[in-house]
Image (cartoon, coloured by chain):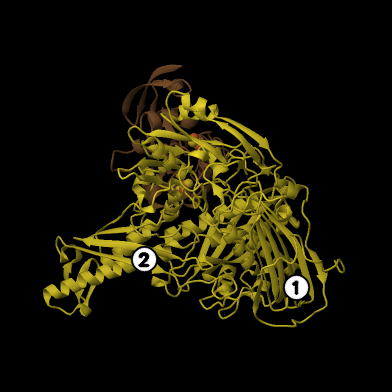
Chain colours: A brown, B yellow
Amino acid sequence: MDAEISLRVDGQAHRLTVDTRTTLLDAMRERLGVTSPKKGCDHGQCGACTVLLDGERQLPCLALAVAHDGAEITTADGLAPPGELHPVQQAFLDQDAFQCGYCTPGQVCSAVAVLDEVARGWPSHASTDLTADPELDHDEVSERMSGNLCRCAAYVNIVPAVQQAGGRS
Amino acid sequence: MRRPDGQAKVRGEFSYAGDLHAEGMLHGVTLRSPHPHARLLRIDTAAARALPGVHAVLTAADVPGDLHFGLTLRDEPVLADGVVRYAGEPVAVVAAIDPRTARRAARAIVVEYEPLPAQTDPTLAADAEPLHAEGNVYRHLAYECGDPRARGVVTVENTYRIGMQDPAFLAPEAGMATPTADGGVRLEVATQWLHSDQRQIAWATGLPPEKVQVVLAGVGGAFGGREDVTLHTHACLLALATGRPVKMEYTREESFLAHRQRHPGTIWLRHSADASGRVVSVEGRVVLDGGAYASTSPVVIANTVTLLQGPYRVDNGRFEGWSVRTNNPSCGAMRGFGVPQAAFAHESQMDALAAALDLDPLEIRLRNALRRGDTATFGQRFTQPTPVREVIEGLRAVPLPPAGGKLPGGVGRASSPGSVRRGVGYAVTMKNLAFSEGHVDESTATVSLRDGHATVHCACAEVGQGFVTVAEQVARTVLGADTVTVTQPDTLIASAGSTSASRQTMASGTAVHRACVAVRDRLLARVARERGLDAGLLSIQDGAVTCDGTPLVDVAAATPGHTVRATEHFAHPPTTALGQGDVYVGFAFSAQRAVVDVDVELGLVSVVQIASCQDVGTVVNPTQLLGQIEGGIVQGMGLAVMEEVVVVDGHITNPEFQDYLIPTIVDAPEVVSVYVTDPQPGMPHGWKGVGEPPLCTAVPAVAAAVRDATGLPLPSVPIRPEHIALGIGTPPTVTRTTPRPPATTGGTALSEEPADRPGTWESEGAAGH
Ligand code: FES
Ligand code: FES
């Protein structure tokens, strides 16, 4: 069964007809040619596809496109105007927080959301005091970034990259 | 210097093989065998072909060229022929207008199988019914040095087991093949070795190699797992059959089934030492499960067997190994290439010896450390820098981390502090670098310079290791170029060999360096001619041509509109067959100390810190060097305590990241990395490969630390929670022996015939255990 939906991806409006079984990730990658979100597993296990969906981080490989009619999506490619870098992207570059780079668009989107979550005072499993404002220390960053696998294991540089972008270095 | 591809990668603009797209392209899908071993009685593709939107359905009968391929033996069919030998073996491929139609068509293919008994025990393979006309033994090797029966005062022996590890690069296999106007085909693919792919595709398509063009598409990690052909040939066959571009892309599950894994193995070792801890003799036997097809199994087994001595002087020993065919998944290259298996076994033995003699683990290693001038068990002399003592001393100087920190287990499985024990373990390893045993290790690069802009062309595959950074850095330094383009590698230039064996900075880095030097010399000669100067006085400094130190003109303005170009080749000195001299180009040495916290009740391990001291030649790019070391350590830690492809009756039971656990950012330990720099002879600036040693060393270091924390023998990796909680695993047999000096000294003797079948040699006897 097909359905017609509209999506706004990186500021651009799209109308498209999709099979109702199509994931949001496939709708973007195969139908809209938006390849910045990567497919590492298609099962919600690697985080490579992470995007910001209505401002929060989501795994579009686990979402059906029809369930997100009218959604506003930001991928790594839409975080900054062409040719420029978002502070998180700049920090990943500065800290060499990647090798092959396949996990990176997802890591970057996750990190943007992490900084937002911390700014809003949301605690994580690593937070020692659930009522205090979370500190961007090593354990806090790791815990919040732990849904994004990196097989090249650039992890040791991802933590300082997130801290740099969060104004703590 | 930052990665030149970095900006595109952090924005998600960098194009990977899975992002390839062409107007009118078709999608290819593979039908795989559900059986580990079966006869193919009938394949009926009529229903699949009849589906609307299906453009081609191919089986073995449709392969125009030679059906068989492989990196060593050509024993693997492009599509199954009469019999399937592993679960997941490709049987047919389909091209259709979209992935869904292609998958539907694959399901519509009718295949009748007659299941056969699956031969899955590698220790029985040599005597089992042959699974293939090529037999079940990919390679057997055996050799002795000195007098293997020499004994010291204590002898320890045990059998060690290493599980199957998946390279698990994050971007599943993908590529797109396009028919070319001359009747050939062009394949864009994520690979490690363009020319090897080209050759094997040419065999199957029946095309001359020059009509098969292979171009590197963006590679999302490799770690050895992209050295073999997987979908490459299928995509090309489908493109040639349909006349349209065909894209193929594996799912994660397919990726587990399709690419080669790290060889699981069983290693028996017996070490005898004198009272001071000096090793008197070593005897070792290895059985590696190569799975259904050869891939690089014949080469990997030689690495495992020859490096069983570790970075220690061993004058007396005998060594034997088999890599064998079974109906398990095929194994091949993975970062470390047979050495992590050897390293886990020999380092476990060194700790067992140290315990038996009540020696400090680092002290026993220092007493046995190889030195320059020593001879390996396999006859090669260590003529290059051999800084084993130096890496151990360098490691010893790194302070231990403070006690405390987070508990093992993480969210929801929290340990109670009372059951957590800290452990510290050490390991030292030796890794051979570059190709071996007479395989030519070479590369070629073309560099051109015009108005200050340099272009580098080389077939070296960038897989994330940072070759493009090294190439750009060299071009900027040698040529004073303002801007550098590293063009997409392809098969239009000569082969650069594989991005593996820690070899590309050495081979392709040197070829680029030589080409840059040649361009520089030509440029300077031209400037000298035009200005009537002595070329010998000219050099390039800070982007300018200088004469005797005085800037003359910017490189960008030196020869306006004129292109200076040079192509240069590099080859390591040739290596020889085993037993005939220099089997390996060189070696790198590495020492690590792992600190772990273990919940001994729940069996949970947290790796707190790994300190590493590695012999790196010279530091080319400090940031990327650290990245290679940390990456290797985390993958080694994965093999030590987390990762195993579980194969039951020939079937992989955990082909996804839900059940195959690769380390997350929470699992990754703190890494403290120090270096020994001892320039590698014959390399520009003394470069040396760095990618593999950290993995090889991390496996035994982490295992040793868990043993230290638990007091358990733990002879298998990965160490699983139940091994700790239930104390599973046999301790080494320790025998007090009567010293027996070697009857003969020196010399390495090769024996081609197995002494007997895999198993163990006669036991030293239980006396004194
Ligand atoms: S592709 Fe979505 S989580 Fe892996
Ligand atoms: S950089 Fe390769 S997977 Fe993260």
Above or below — where is B555 with respect to B379? above
Q: Residue at x 56, y 49 (%)?
A: B76
Badge 1: chain ID: B
Q: Chain of mark 2?
A: B
Left or right of residue B604: residue B564: left
Residue at mark 1: B272
Q: Position of residue B174 (x, y in %)?
A: 45, 42
Q: Which residue occupies the foreground of this view, B188 or A59?
A: B188
Q: Quadrant of residue B99?
A: top left
Q: Earlier in the sequence, mark 2 or mark 1?
A: 1
Q: Residues within 10 Å of mark 2 (few under 14, many from 20)?
A: many
Q: Residue B748 location, x and y as percent?
A: 64, 76
Q: Tell me if I can see residue A46 in this picture.
A: no
Where is residue B2? Give x, y as percent: 36, 55
Residue placed under numbered mark 2 in the picture: B511
Nearer the observer: mark 2 or 1; the answer is 2
Looking at the picture, does residue B310 appear above or below residue B262?
A: below
Q: Quadrant of the C terminus of chain B?
A: bottom right
Q: Nearer the viewer, residue B383 or B76?
A: B76
Give SS at disc 1: strand
Image label count: 2
